[in-house]
Image (tube, rainbow, N blue to C red):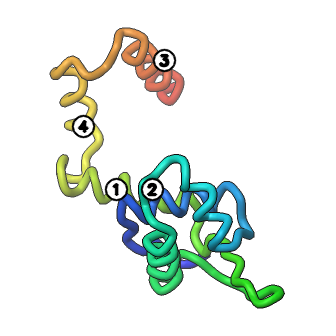
Amino acid sequence: MSSVPKISEAEWVVMQVIWNWYPIAANEVVEALAGSTEWSPRTIRTLINRLYEKGALDRTKRDGIFHYTPAIEESACIEAESESFLKRFFGGSLNPLVAYFLENGKLSPEEIEDLRKRFSSKGE
């Protein structure tokens, strides 16, 4: 899979459908998003085309219909977005992010305990 392009929030929603059900035709993406968004079919097709132009999607034509598959892995997108977020807001370091959530009451006691277990198991 190729390098990871920048993907907008709306494009991310479309990619979620394609990652889950590829190969998939544009009409099927429209149907999948009909109940969860208020986007018109034209808007969804525009998002699909943008993703294709960015290199996030591959397409093949079968029986006169384009079917889309991801050209990038979901995990690669998550990694790229996470790194971008950390760089923009926390200088690229995870420590200030965790501290922010701890200090501002954003983590439940259960989440803190889960993090504690994860950190201690990594140190072994």
What residue would you read off at disc 4? 97
Residue, x 61% and y 75% (percent of image)? 71
Label 4 environment density (alpha carbons within 10 Å; few <14, some 14–19, many ≥20)? some
Q: Report how far apart the C-alphas of labels 3 and 2 lie in the structure.
A: 22 Å
- Asked if marks 1 and 2 touch (Cβ < 8 Å), the reply is yes
Between disc 1 and disc 3, the foreground one is: 1
Badge 1 is on which residue?
Answer: 83
Q: Residues within 10 Å of mark 3 (few under 14, many from 20)?
A: few
In the displayed structure, would residue 29 be above or below residue 102?
Answer: below
Report how far apart the C-alphas of labels 2 and 4 lie in the structure: 16 Å
Do the residues under discs 3 and 2 have CB atoms within 8 angstroms?
no
Q: What residue type is labelled 4?
A: Leu
Residue 13: image x %, image y %?
Answer: 48, 57
Dot 3 amino acid type: Lys
Q: Badge 2 is on which residue? A: 79
* Circle 4/circle 1 CB separation < 8 Å: no
